[in-house]
Amino acid sequence: MGVLSNKVGREALKPGDHIYSWRNAWIWAHHGIYVGEGRVIHFTRAVGQEAGTGTVLDRIFSCSSSNTSRAPCEECGDQSMATGVISSCLDCFLSGGGLYLFEYGVSPAFFLAKARGGTCTLAVSDTADDVVHRASHLLENGFGGYNIFRNNCEDFAIYCKTGLLVSTNLSVGRSGQANSFVAVATAVISSPLRYLTTSVGGWTVVMYCVSRVSSDIGVRRDVVKVPVEDLVNPEGLCRSTAVPSEVHANPAH
């Protein structure tokens, strides 16, 4: 583990670890929580429906198994059309990809050195018992509707690790991957200001870094700690104040 790679061996995994595996030529990664005994709890959407656009973007931003032609897993069955919070064996979760460990409580310098979002955060993780409890509770009660930018697999894993939810509707969710795409857009939009600097490339890098850091769950001011039991309303639907149509906190608490 280090700046260049977060890749780990299976023997290093511990219950409560936030793990991920890259999909589709490293364009997007799928995230989940390892809960022990070779099982992973993760938030997914049926294959071909990830972005919800009905276009090729659904394949690019894939979180489901990339190999739907293989025989179903004897342990998990066919989960290619599963939607919501599910439990899978480690092999099914990885879907032939590598195993990587998401890092928590990193320094700002280390965070910026990891130029690719969705691999680490400045936020500090809660205890392994708390993490597994949240993941197990959401496996039974759900985590709302999947949204590629507002409520995706990384958002789920980060919530399980920290208990933090975004409390406004003005930005993307907790996902470092989604925030990286926004950071790139911010750098491009701000390009007219490049004429105020001597280096176009330097300005773009500065804007990208500023946007990434300011949107990280560890420094944002629009986040609140929400007990997992408060995420579920009486009808059993997972909710959050951050995303009215996806996840809303129970107003009764």
Image: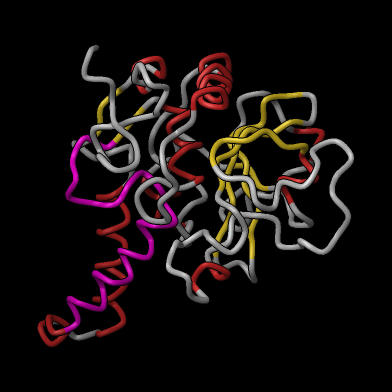
Q: Residue at x 56, y 54 (%)?
A: 3
Question: In the displayed structure, does residue 75 sit left or right of residue 169?
Answer: right
> Magenta part of the protein: which range?
166-191
Residue 103 at x, y percent in the picture:
53, 40
Instruction: Examine the rendered structure and indicate whether residue 52 appears above or below residue 134.
Output: below
Residue 37 at x, y percent in the picture:
79, 24
Q: Is residue 148 magenta?
A: no
Comparing 221 with 95, the one in front is: 95
Quadrant of the image occupied by residue 232: top left
Q: Residue at x 64, y 68 (%)?
A: 24
Comparing 148 with 203, the one in front is: 148
Q: Residue at x 60, y 49 (%)?
A: 2
Question: In the displayed structure, does residue 212 sit left or right of residue 98?
Answer: left
Question: In the displayed structure, does residue 245 sit left or right of residue 194?
Answer: right
Comparing 145 with 41, the one in front is: 145
Task: Pick the quarter of the image with the C terminus.
Answer: top left
Residue 195 at x, y percent in the picture:
13, 87
User: How many labels sit on residues?
Assistant: 0
Quadrant of the image occupied by residue 151: top left
Quadrant of the image occupied by residue 183: bottom left
Comparing 97 with 100, the one in front is: 97
Query: Can I make out residue 129 in this image?
Result: yes
Q: Is residue 177 magenta?
A: yes
